[in-house]
Image (cartoon, grey):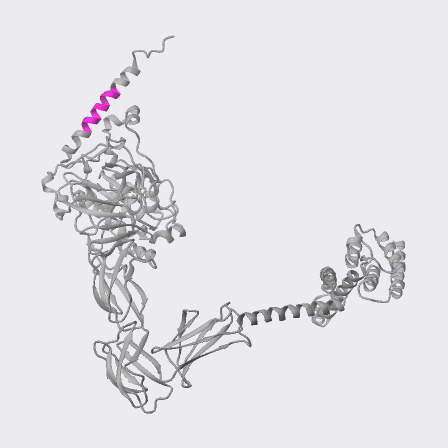
Amino acid sequence: MSDAAPDGPDTRRALLAVAAAFALVAAAAAAPALAGEAPLGGLDSPASAEDLPRALSQFDFVRDLVGEPSDAGGLEVPGGETFGALTAGGSTDVGGPISEEQLRGAARPHFLATSEEPQYWRTTGYVAYTGGGWAQRPVSRVAPSRPPDQREVTWHTVTLRQPANRLPAPWRPVDLRYDPGPETDQETTFDATETSGIAADPLVPAGETYEVSSLESVSDRGLLREVRVSGSVASTEYTTVDTTQRVSRLAERIVGDADNRYDAAAAVEAYLEGEKTYSLRDAPETGDQAADEFLFEHDVGYCENFATAMTVLLRTQDVPARYVAGYTSGERVGDDQYLVRGADAHAWVEVFFEDYGWVRFDPTPSAPRQQADSDLAAGSETFQVRVSGALVPGESVAATVTAAGSPVSGAAVSVNGGFASVTNESGAVRFVVPYAESVNVTVEPSANRTTTGGAAGGYGLASLPGREQPDDGRNGSASREFEVQTDVSVAFDSPPQPGETLDARLTVGGRPFADAAVSLDGTDQGRTNGNGELTVTVPETAAGVVDIAVSRDDLSKTVSYPLDDLQVAVSPDLVAPLPTTGATAKVTSGGEPVVGAPVQLNGKQVGVTDADGAVRLTIPLDRAPSVTATASGKTATAAVDWVLVSLALAVLAAAGVLAGVALAARRRGLTLARVVAALRYAAREALAAAVDAISGLGDALDDLAAEFRAAAADGWREVLAWLTGLPARLRLPDLAGFVERVAAAARAGSRTAADGTADDDTPAPLQRVWARFVALVGVEGWRTKTPVEVAQAAVDAGFPREPVTRVASSFRDAAYGGRDTDAAAEEAADALGDLDAEEGEQ
């Protein structure tokens, strides 16, 4: 048998495949010319299955040769962990509830874009309506006939903050520039198709930047109104839809007598905006007819529901339309810069117009969508602010503003409520540190503009002007508080004395304190010059210290200049200075408290003295921690002695107390074994008492039920009398008896552990009675049960309660409670005799 293939249908199929391949290559080479433009950055790959001519796509082997579109997972809402459309693929579901986890992740930045105008950032489109969602399908390529020299191109820059296999770009992208960063060692291939946009393989990592050009917008809607409603040269895939009759009838009613495609699409868009409510949190589950269910059964949905409904409605009227996923413009953060988050993920509709290509329509109500986006982004940090240099009042410092890790240009920067400047192209700005305790740096974009709704351009036609929107509340402002170095020091030309006039020099943060108002002990002295200098007179009444008050703008400080030597005294909170305990250091000069003196503990500053010259500190584990205070060039140090000695004495004292307790317990015969035994016996007896109480309650309820039935049999008067007398018969639980019972069991357990005897080492007469009793009632496992448990088992077995309880109580009281054993044995024997007699009668 020959292995050679026969000359038949298989051979003809192979020849047809070769011819198809040549046709595809020729079509790919001719397509740019037909489209009137160059391929996307020279990166167009061979035609994909979705670019096959319809006549060829019906052959499975041709589609196998080229390959099907990949299904990388659709729009990431719902079903994913976050919002987004950076990893869109061959199919996507529509609608459905959104999880709280997705909502929480919606504020995450996805990319930062630089564009002259706000844009819709398209990532992918879908052709085939599956009922519950959308899928990509092979379609014929249709190019507009508008000459290329009439279409201007604009460039946009995108920096990714999440990995992407679909690159966001305004529709329609024309060219792509991508230079991988030094940390990216992978080779990336790009495939630009009319439906899917720009696909990347493998994923482009976060942090990468690319430039993409797109066709610039025109604003003449009259051109679009020249296109008739139906009868398009676009693929019938864009006018084919499997839906219900009531959807088609609704579409006819909405479109009405519109005589052009633009008015028909605008009518459907306006209908959905006006009749349906937007909500991310109340969207219902969808079935296998998502458009029909949204139009007739639900009043609430989000962008996916709106875009699906519009696309399906238009297709029933033979209007070519497709479902598109991507992002809205995002949040304006600087000059032509937009921060796009997961919350900005969106879906809209593209309608095909002969000579102009695909035009965007957005049927989702803009105001509630923008409010929802704002709510999702609330609490997230739009800007990051970093300050370089020391923050000293009066000094000029540089600040850098970034958004999602990239510099922001043109952002307005305010310092403590006053406008400072705007950032440059590197995101940098300089400002003078104000005279204040802290600096609040506020950043906001110079302007915020958003567009939405309305037709916007696509293939061969850029955006038509969108409708102006009210401010959505996302102004991108951010504030950060910084501490300022405000330590003030004073130096005199010579040691000051009361009544003396001399020159002083003031500094703040180590820099001259210029133009500061100065007073000494409440007496005004004037203002410092540019070098922080002025001449002052020490008051005649000054003693020990002189208080120097300094102020300028929002900064006011008071420091004490010691006229005498400094002294530091440390007072521990406890009797002795133990490690980790608190202490107070007080700084004085001539007996007067020194205010504003920095205090260090073992070389590290712990604070500045208050109005009483005091500062709090924690004693470290050190042999002799040193406390140092500095004021106006004078220094004093004190050592905290006896720290380790105090710790050793405390440990010895604690050990002595424990030893004393142990010795006292031993002398009283109290051991750990006795404690454990007492607790075990007490717990067991408490449980037995609880069982007795529950059993007694059941018997009492049975008795009450019998009494009620008897009273009811005699008429309502007897019932009323019975109810009247019921409160007087109620008795509170015998808590004292319960406590005594448990205490007796604990004492018995303690004695058992001390004597080393077993639980049943009771005197022989009583033990013999107990043995006869358990033999009579036949309770199994009685050796591991308490007397109360044995008695309850006997009653449950049908023995009379009264004699059984007497026997068990006598044994228990003798065994655990210290009762006289002879009397207990006699009583138990009598009860056992009564039990025998009653059993004999039965």
Name the quadrant of the N terminus: top left
Magenta stretch, main secondary structure, is helix
Front residue of this view, candidates 296 and 224: 224
Report which quarter residue 475 is drawn in.
bottom left
Magenta stretch: includes residue 166: no
Q: In the visual, does 377 lie left or right of 228?
A: right
User: 175 above or below 528?
Assistant: above
The boundaries of the magenta stretch are 16-27
Front residue of this view, candidates 609 and 175: 609
Report which quarter residue 675 is drawn in.
bottom right
Front residue of this view, candidates 145 and 494: 494
Residue 768 x/y as whole percent? 89, 56
Q: In the visual, does 388 lie left or right of 730?
A: left
Residue 465 x/y as whole percent? 17, 51
Magenta stretch: includes residue 25: yes
State whether residue 734 appears in this view.
Answer: no
Residue 256 x/y as whole percent? 21, 45
User: 320 above or below 10?
Assistant: below
User: 566 above or below 140?
Assistant: below
